[in-house]
Every structure is written in structure tokens, then in C-alpha cells.
């Protein structure tokens, strides 16, 4: 039926544009009621949909501090007078409303059925129970407000939705603490809701004391309370160092003893434990202070809000005058380095910068022999030792190359490598370090004297620290490094691991002025040079180290700079194990000789050396023609002087650790260095096998396809190459942990831990939210899980799911539930329905389920027994959440929509740009190509029953639909007739009823804009 009602002229003029707020009323609570709405098909800020004959609306004046909610009837008359701060729709005869910040329930006359006393409230179900928040708990009440059941802290629910027998309930899942060394889970105390990263051997744990929060305590390594939350009363993760504990109370960090008693009056904005006896505290003004174990200030940083940087177990922070460096084992150094920069290179810390005190530096240059190395240290487990020790390299300085002293003079001269040092000077340094007295705690924090570090205008290398925190360079070396530009050596990496040789030098040293010969910085912290050296590569290097020498000769040196292979060759490949290929100048371009690490030639058959294509350890990869003159691949074992694999294979890839991919008869497998098959040649491609490192290979598992749901990742197995044992099927590539351990994902999303031998332990139920490794501790956090309770509060659907999408559609009683790895269709008892079809979408009111068929990129509509009803082109062809009254919108014609019935028949053509669910025989529709952006309502004939005239429109509910027309919010009936109009006149919200009479406010409007508006009749406002 065509919409025929015409708004009276006076209303059209008065409501032509919303009243603009004056300066004094800017940002009023009313503005969203007239200038915005949430979006297509939803309620607005100030108007709710009809339910059980009533709709909640927000009313009031611009001068009011806030509006008040009341309820209108279907004719636009106020049925329940506005008196509520918030309001929800009526459900089974009662509506939840709030007054004074608490919630209660009213009946349709506006009388209190349950007086307000709850934190929040939701709708009643048909059996007469509802879910509310009482204190910090969700509770189940009856219609008299009596509490029938109290749920555990942390559970959360959105109540019983209209027409539902069940209510979704979110149940918190406590974290798990896994010992990766044993694969076992540590039993945590009851109530633990959160774990934080450990520090100083203690694990912070939070116990739930309210819905979303609670106090923190500290657990020991066995998962038992070391300090309980009740003692510490900390609002954030506490930190302990001996008998000093940092806790956050009253918005400030402070320090307490193990009994929870304050030991300091100071309060800080931030606190961080750095090492034994050392704290970094930040005041409210942003000033960062270093405190000792007695909480006495040791140093105030010049920069505000100092942050700690972390990498590879090292922690460091620098300001304009000081650099703090903490090693992985807790040793701390406080260095007088200005604008310090720390680089972590292969586990060592390289400190760059400039001396903090130029005057001290000048004195150091004047008298270098008087400057001992003074570097403070701590072991990380006890209070910082009050002892400054010198580098081991200092003590060994006088004895550098002591073994070479026994060499004949001519042999020593042949080595010609020069250790740049001053024996007398370094000996004095060693004596000074040995005679250093133990200082008190305060003195250990005196910075390293500038005399012990190099002076450089643009920032020089100050020191290199080993992983244990000990400095590697003595004072003499640091000073002499001023003349060089250091480039750290980068060792060759294979299969994710570094082929680290402990003798590999630290860095290549190039003279700043070009006057000094090339040099190396050895692993012992010594500078060694040789005038013969012309060039040395620093990237992807192996030992012995290749050197291009004078006269374009090539040789190799050991870690101390001595010639391991004399420079007698014209070219040489980097060593890959104990051997390499070299060429003399008189050899042809394609000729080469195999040599060992001392330069001694090694005999191999001519047919092997002539056809060699690769070298790795003791093995030569070579190609040799077969009887058909096709070049086949094989392996030659150098030490055994015999073939490891006869030359009869299609291809051999490079070795990764001890294994190589080999192609045989167009199939790929894996062999070890003995030439034995570890994985038979059954794969189509070498890339199907991925080496993970630590002796594990990842291979596809075709048998696992389809078991993890449509959203599951590809199925794999991990193969232990040392034993040949295969793991259970995992989905997606595993995450690598430290110490050769991995975490994979099972079909249901659960996490499984693989130890270094490949043994598997399940460590979560369902897909975890996060996994964090801290030493041998692995913290596994899981998202809250959703289940469903019935009207008596019993958990009828187990809390196993990440979400319901959709929740149980009616009347079918089926839901689509997420298990983490994918979705499944379940019934109202949690039982999987039509499991063989996988992920499906139940269609409300249609007795149908829609499944996607990935193999054909189509969708299948089945009945509830799984019988195919119709097959539809494309995936996701219907708007499953809009199924209603026996039909569902489907999509065709490049995003156009129509209606399909339960037989799979298209009963309305796909002509509409947007199409809502069918409600009361009408569906909200927009057709851009015909009627532009305006919305109307169609019936199942596909024609507009209510012509498109609305800027936006809501679906019909309870025979009324909310629309936006002529800049006004209206309710219309199923014939398109306006039953309620909302507007702003005289700076207040005004409501007109179906007869276009003012129904609210009750009083006559007095401003000039409302002179032609008749006052409301005395009986038009029936609200109580």
C-alpha cells in the first residue's frame, strides 16, 4: 500500500531542520538524538525497537544534565513515563531499567517488579529466570528477584535473548605453566588468573579477587606461593630481590619486606628490577634513578623515563653520561660512556660511545701505564659483588703466543703475524687488576675509568663483553682500537644454526688513516696484524679464515692470525668443514686441488674431482655420466676414499646439518652423510620437505586433510631424522623454542610441545591465546571459552568454544561454534551435528543447514538429516544471519540480492543492492540502479510494498520499523503509515503520535517555533 499520510505543514516547518545547539549548550546529551545514528538496521542512540508492544525512547530538555528513558506504545503515546537512566526492551513481561546507577525490573505499567539493586540486568526467559550482576558475580534470579544461583568470579554472560532457552556464558580459563625440560605442567594454586614473566627466580601470579582483577603474589620454581597476594597486596606484577619486594599500591610503586611491611616511604611511577641489588625507579616527574639493594640512590640519569632495551638475553640502557649493561646471567656493568650504543653480535655485547669525562680521558692519554681496568660486576643470583675484576684477556696479555716463543726463530718469522701489544704495559695492568682491593657496595658503582677506554670524537668501540658479562678487551687494546674501524665477523649459518667456531676472531680491523696494515681482533681480545694481508671477508665466514695476501696470493689463517694454509694459491674457496678447493696460478680455469685445513693436498679420483659440484664436510657432491651418457649425481666420502652414494640419482641438494634432499626417479627423499635413506623418495618436490633444525624435518601429511575444519592449516608431521620416528599430525608450521623444542597445533587447535627427542605433550585444551617462553618455563594463556546454560543455570553446552556465530537459531536449536581450529554445527546439548560435512551455517526457520564444498567451490543446502536439497554456485552465497520466515537472502549478479526458499528455489530475483531479513512479510531493501540510496520494503513478490523514501531503515520488529525520513526519526507500521515522529522543538525532544498530535512532553510548548503546535490532550499521555 502506498504511504498516504502527509505531515501537517506546521510539523514540516517546525522539524525541517534539527534545532542547532547554542554556544551555552554545545555537546549536549541531545545532539546524538538529532544528528547521528548507529547504522543501517540498528537502533539509534535515543530510540529502541518495539518489543511486546512497547519501545524505549529517550526524552528531555537540552538544559537537563541527561535525558530520561520511558516507553511508548505502538500509537506513539507514552505508556511508561520517562524516569530511567538506562532501559532495555521488554522481555516476557518485564523490562530491565536503571535508576541511581543500579538496575531493577518494571512491568508494562511502569510498576517495580524488582526494585533496583543490581550492577546490570538482562531479559527474562520464558521459564521466569534472568541473569544479573550482583556485586562482582553473575547470578540467576527469579521474577521476585530471589537469587537462585551464583556463578564463579570471572564468568560473563549477555543474558537470555528473546526466544532462547539457553544463554551464552563465557568462562575464564586459567593459564598453564609448563616445564619445557620435562614437558609437565606445574599445578598452580587455586584462583590464579594471570602469570607474568619471571624475574630473579620468582614468577608473579595474579589471583582473581573481582570480576576482572585481583592482587598479585610470587610463586617459586615449584609453583608454590613464595609470597601470597594477601601479603603483598600489589595491583601489578611484583618483583623480588632477596628481602626487598617492589609492589604497586595506591597508584604508586613502593618497596616492602617479605611480610608486606613498607621499608621505604618513597613512591615511584615505575620500578624495574635490573640485577641483584639493583633497581631502576622513575619518579612522578619522570626522573630515573638507579637504586642499590638498600634502596639508596647510586645514580640519577640525565634522561627522563629511561627505558631498558633487550636483545638475546642482554639488557642495556644509556643516557648522556652512563651506560648500564646487564648480561644474560645477571652480571651488571656501569660504564662511564657518553651517548653509549650497544650492539649484540653473536651473543657478545659491543659497547660504543665516548668517554663521559674528557678531562679524565686527557689524563689517561698522559699516563696510560697507570690506568688499570676497573669493571664492576654481579653474578645475578646474589648481591652484586663488591669486586672490580679485569678481563681474562688482561691476565693473559703477557703470555700471548707463549707457545710461539718456543718456535725456531725462522718459523716464527715465517708466521709474520704481529701481536700489537706492549708486554710491560699489559703486565702492569694485570698486576694492578690482581692487586685491586674489594670495595664496598657504593664503590662498585663507580663508572669504568675513562683511562681504560678509547677516546674518539665520533664514538669508538669501548669494550666487548662475553655472554657471562666479563670484558674481553684490556685497557691497552681498547686504547689501540682508536686507530681502527672494526667490522665484526659473521659466521656461516646453515639450517638456522650458526656454525660458530670459538676460535673465530671477533672483528676485522681497518686502519682509520690507511697507514696501518689490516688486522684482526682475536677471540682473546688481542689485535693481530700482518703486512701481507690485503683483504679478508667478514660475512658468512668459516675457519680457517681466507685471506688475500700480497701479490694476489690466497691463504688461510687460524683464530690467532697465524697462517694455517700459507698464501701459495691463486684462488681458494671458503672451507666447509675440514676441506676446500684451491687453485694454483699454473692450473687451468676449471682445475682445482682439494686441500685440508693445513694446506696439504688430498687425493681424490680424477672422475670425482673433475665432476665435483659441491663440498660439505667430508663429502663431495659430484656428477658422473651413466651408460646413457646422462650425468647422474653421487656422493664421495673423502676420509673413507669411497662413494657414500653411487652416481645414480637425479639431483642432490646442499646438506643441511647432516642431511640432504635427494631426487631419485622423479621423487624426492632424504639421505644422511652415510648415504642412507632417512626419508624414502616419495615426494613430488624437494620443497615438500622443510628442515626445521635440530634434526627435525617437516613433511606434509595427506591423511590429515579435512580433520581440522575448513579453517585449519595444512597438515604436517615432524620427522626425527636421528630415529626416523614421525609425530602425530600437526596443523601449520610449528613454533621453535629454545634448546631444540617446538610447539605444534593439533586438529582441534590444542598446542602440543615436542622435546628435543620429538616426544609430544599436549599443553592446552583448544588453541591458546599466547605462548611465552622464559628459560625452562612456558606460560600458556588461553582465551575465555563460551558455553551455554539453561534456565536453571546448569551448563548444558560445555564451555569449549571461542564463539557462537550464530547462537542457537530457532526453532531448529542449532548453533555454529568455533573450536579454535574451525567451526562445527552443534545442537543445544553441545553434540556435533552432521560432523562429516564440517563447518556449516544453520538457517533459522528453514530447517536447513548450508555447507561449503571447497573441492568444487560451491555450497550445499541440506536438511537436518544431511540430505542435499540444493547445490548453489560459489561459497557463502546466502546471508545466513538474515534467514527468517522460511526464506534467506542470496547473492548473485555481482553482489545483488534476492530471496531463496527452503527448497533452494529463487523466489525473488537478485536485483537489490541491500536486502534485510523478512519480518512480518516485509524486508528492508535498497536498489541503487533504480531508486538510488533510499530504502523501502519489499514483499515476496519482489515489489515494493512500502516505496523507497527513507535515508535509512530498520527491520520490522513487533509490526513496527524505525526509519529516518525528512531528517526525522519515525516509526511506521506494515502499511507504511507513520505512527510516531520524533523531533526537537524549544530545545527539547518532542514526540508526535499516530494522529500527529503532541504526545510528549505533557506540557504545551511555549517557544516561538511551537506557536502553531496544539498542546497535548489531557488523556493523550497515559503513562503512569
Image (cartoon, helix red, strand yellow):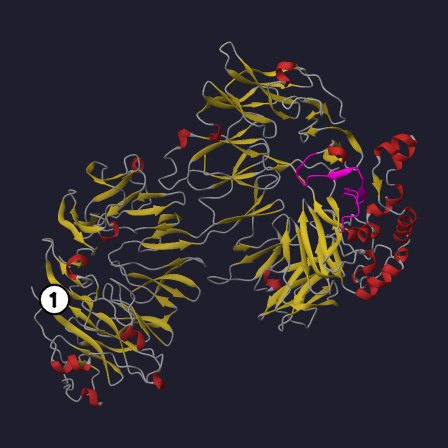
Of 95 and 912, nearer the camera is 912
- Taken as a whole, is the magenta stretch helix, strand or loop? loop
Of 513 and 973, nearer the camera is 513
Residue at x 14% of width, y 87% of height:
1012
Q: Is residue 486 left or right of residue 35?
A: right
Q: Please rate how many residues cluster around mark 1, counting C-alpha atoms within 10 Å: few if below 14, some from 14 to 19, many from 20.
A: many
Q: Over which residues does the magenta segment extend?
A: 513-542
Q: Is residue 719 above or below residue 26?
A: above
Magenta segment: does it hold 736? no
Q: Report the label total.
A: 1
Residue at the spot of label 1: 976
| Quadrant of the snapshot with the C terminus | bottom left
Of 783 and 520, nearer the camera is 520
| Residue 271 visible somewhere in the drawing | yes
Measuring from the top left, give residue 616's x and y in whole percent: 63, 26
Measuring from the top left, give residue 76's x and y in whole percent: 17, 74
Q: Is residue 510 above or below residue 290?
A: above
Amino acid at each position: 500500500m502506498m504511504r498516504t499520510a502527509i505531515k501537517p505543514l506546521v510539523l514540516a516547518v517546525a522539524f525541517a531542520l534539527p534545532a542547532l545547539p547554542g554556544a551555552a549548550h554545545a555537546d549536549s546529551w541531545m545532539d546524538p538524538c538529532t544528528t547521528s545514528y548507529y547504522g543501517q538496521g540498528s537502533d539509534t542512540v535515543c530510540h529502541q525497537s518495539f518489543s511486546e508492544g512497547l519501545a524505549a525512547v529517550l526524552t528531555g530538555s537540552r538544559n537537563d544534565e541527561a535525558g530520561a528513558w520511558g516507553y511508548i506504545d505502538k500509537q506513539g503515546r507514552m505508556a511508561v513515563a520517562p524516569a530511567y537512566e538506562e532501559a532495555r526492551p521488554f522481555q516476557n513481561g518485564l523490562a530491565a531499567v536503571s535508576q541511581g546507577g543500579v538496575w531493577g525490573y518494571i512491568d508494562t505499567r511502569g510498576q517495580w517488579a524488582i526494585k533496583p539493586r543490581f550492577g546490570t540486568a538482562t531479559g527474562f526467559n520464558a521459564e521466569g529466570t534472568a541473569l544479573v550482576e550482583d556485586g562482582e558475580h553473575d547470578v540467576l534470579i527469579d521474577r521476585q528477584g530471589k537469587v537462585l544461583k551464583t556463578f564463579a568470579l570471572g564468568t560473563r554472560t549477555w543474558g537470555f535473548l528473546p526466544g532462547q532457552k539457553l544463554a551464552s556464558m563465557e568462562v575464564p580459563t586459567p593459564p598453564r605453566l609448563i616445564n619445557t625440560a620435562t614437558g609437565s605442567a606445574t599445578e598452580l594454586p587455586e584462583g590464579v588468573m594471570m602469570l607474568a614473566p619471571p624475574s630473579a627466580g620468582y614468577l608473579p601470579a595474579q589471583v582473581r579477587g573481582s570480576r576482572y582483577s585481583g592482587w598479585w603474589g610470587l610463586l617459586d620454581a615449584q609453583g608454590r606461593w613464595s609470597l601470597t597476594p594477601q601479603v603483598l597486596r600489589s595491583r601489578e606484577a611484583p618483583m623480588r630481590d632477596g628481602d626487598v619486594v617492589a609492589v604497586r599500591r595506591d597508584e604508586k610503586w613502593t618497596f616492602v619486606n617479605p611480610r608486606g611491611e613498607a621499608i621505604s616511604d618513597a613512591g615511584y611511577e615505575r620500578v624495574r628490577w635490573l640485577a641483584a641489588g639493583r633497581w631502576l625507579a622513575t619518579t612522578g616527574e619522570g626522573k630515573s634513578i638507579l637504586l642499590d639493594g638498600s634502596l639508596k640512590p647510586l645514580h640519577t640519569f640525565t634522561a627522563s623515563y629511561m627505558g631498558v632495551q633487550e636483545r638475546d638475553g642482554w639488557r642495556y640502557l644509556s643516557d648522556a653520561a652512563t651506560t648500564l649493561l646487564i648480561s644474560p646471567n645477571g652480571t651488571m656493568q656501569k660504564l662511564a660512556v657518553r651517548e653509549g650504543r650497544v650492539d649484540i653480535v653473536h651473543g657478545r655485547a659491543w659497547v660504543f660511545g665516548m668517554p663521559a669525562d674528557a678531562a679524565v680521558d686527557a689524563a689517561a692519554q698522559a699516563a696510560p701505564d697507570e690506568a688499570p681496568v676497573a669493571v664492576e660486576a654481579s653474578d645475578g643470583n646474589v648481591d652484586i659483588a663488591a669486586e672490580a675484576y679485569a678481563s681474562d684477556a688482561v691476565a693473559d696479555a703477557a703470555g700471548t703466543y707463549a707457545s710461539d716463543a718456543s718456535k725456531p726463530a725462522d718459523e716464527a718469522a715465517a708466521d709474520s703475524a704481529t701481536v700489537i701489544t706492549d708486554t710491560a704495559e699489559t703486565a702492569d695492568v694485570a698486576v694492578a687488576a690482581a692487586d685491586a682491593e674489594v670495595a664496598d657496595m657504593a664503590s662498585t658503582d663507580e663508572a669504568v675509568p675513562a683511562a681504560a677506554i678509547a677516546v674518539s670524537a665520533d664514538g669508538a668501540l669501548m669494550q666487548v663483553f662475553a655472554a657471562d658479562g666479563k670484558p674481553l678487551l684490556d685497557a691497552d687494546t681498547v686504547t689501540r682500537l682508536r686507530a681502527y674501524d672494526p667490522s665484526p665477523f659473521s659466521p656461516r649459518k646453515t639450517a638456522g644454526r650458526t656454525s660458530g667456531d670459538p676460535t673465530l676472531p671477533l672483528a676485522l680491523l681497518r686502519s682509520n688513516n690507511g697507514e696501518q696494515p689490516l688486522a684482526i681482533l682475536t677471540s682473546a681480545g688481542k689485535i693481530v696484524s700482518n703486512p701481507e694481508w690485503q683483504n679478508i671477508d667478514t660475512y658468512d665466514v668459516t675457519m680457517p679464515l681466507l685471506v688475500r695476501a700480497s701479490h694476489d696470493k690466497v691463504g688461510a689463517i687460524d683464530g690467532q692470525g697465524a697462517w694455517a694454509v700459507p698464501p701459495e694459491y691463486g684462488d681458494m674457496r671458503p672451507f666447509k668443514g675440514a676441506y676446500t678447493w684451491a687453485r694454483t696460478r699454473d692450473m687451468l680455469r676449471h682445475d682445482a686441488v682439494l686441500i685440508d685445513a693445513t694446506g696439504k693436498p688430498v687425493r681424490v679420483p680424477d672422475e670425482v674431482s673433475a665432476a665435483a659440484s659441491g663440498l660439505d664436510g667430508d663429502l663431495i657432491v659430484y656428477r658422473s655420466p651413466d651408460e646413457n651418457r646422462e650425468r647422474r649425481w653421487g656422493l664421495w666420502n673423502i676420509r673413507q676414499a669411497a662413494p657414500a652414494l653411487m652416481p645414480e640419482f637425479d639431483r642432490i641438494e646442499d646438506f643441511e646439518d647432516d642431511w640432504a634432499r635427494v631426487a631419485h626417479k622423479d621423487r624426492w627423499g632424504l639421505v644422511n652423510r652415510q648415504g642412507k635413506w632417512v626419508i624414502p623418495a616419495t615426494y613430488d618436490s624437494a620443497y615438500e620437505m622443510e628442515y626445521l633444525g635440530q634434526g627435525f624435518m617437516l613433511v606434509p601429511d595427506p591423511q590429515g586433510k579435512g580433520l581440522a575444519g575448513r579453517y585449519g592449516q595444512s597438515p604436517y608431521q615432524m620427522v626425527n631424522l636421528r630415529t626416523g620416528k614421525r609425530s602425530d599430525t600437526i596443523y601449520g608450521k610449528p613454533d621453535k623454542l629454545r634448546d631444540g623444542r617446538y610447539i605444534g597445533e593439533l586438529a582441534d587447535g590444542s598446542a602440543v610441545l615436542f622435546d628435543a627427542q620429538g616426544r609430544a605433550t599436549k599443553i592446552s585444551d583448544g588453541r591458546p591465546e599466547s605462548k611465552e617462553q622464559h628459560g625452562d618455563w612456558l606460560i600458556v594463556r588461553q582465551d575465555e571459552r563460551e558455553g551455554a546454560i539453561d534456565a536453571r543455570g546448569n551448563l548444558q553446552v560445555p564451555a569449549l568454544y571461542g564463539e557462537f556465530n550464530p547462537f542457537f537459531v530457532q526453532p531448529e536449536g542449532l548453533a555454529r561454534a568455533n573450536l579454535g581450529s574451525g567451526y562445527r554445527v552443534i545442537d543445544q546439548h553441545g553434540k556435533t551435528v552432521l560432523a562429516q560435512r564440517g563447518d556449516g551455517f544453520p538457517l533459522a526457520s528453514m530447517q536447513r543447514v548450508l555447507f561449503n564444498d571447497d573441492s568444487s567451490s560451491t555450497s550445499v543446502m541440506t536438511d537436518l538429516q544431511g540430505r542435499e536439497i540444493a547445490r548453489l554456485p560459489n561459497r557463502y552465497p546466502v546471508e545466513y544471519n538474515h534467514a527468517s520466515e522460511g526464506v534467506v537472502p542470496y547473492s548473485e549478479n555481482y553482489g545483488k540480492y534476492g530471496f531463496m526458499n527452503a527448497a533452494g528455489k529463487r523466489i525473488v530475483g537478485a536485483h537489490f543492492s541491500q536486502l534485510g531479513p523478512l519480518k512480518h512479510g516485509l524486508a528492508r531493501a535498497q536498489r541503487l540502479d533504480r531508486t538510488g540510496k533510499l530504502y523501502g520494503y519489499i514483499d515476496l513478490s519482489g515489489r515494493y510494498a512500502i516505496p523507497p523514501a527513507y535515508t535509512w531503515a530498520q527491520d520490522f520488529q513487533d509490526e513496527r520499523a524505525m526509519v529516518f525520513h525528512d531528517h526525522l526519526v519515525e516509526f511506521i507500521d506494515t502499511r507504511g503509515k507513520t505512527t510516531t515522529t520524533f523531533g526537537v522543538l524549544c530545545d527539547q525532544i518532542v514526540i508526535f503520535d499516530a494522529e500527529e498530535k503532541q504526545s510528549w512532553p505533557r506540557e504545551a510548548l511555549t517557544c516561538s517555533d511551537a506557536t502553531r503546535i496544539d498542546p497535548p490532550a489531557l488523556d493523550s499521555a497515559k503513562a503512569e
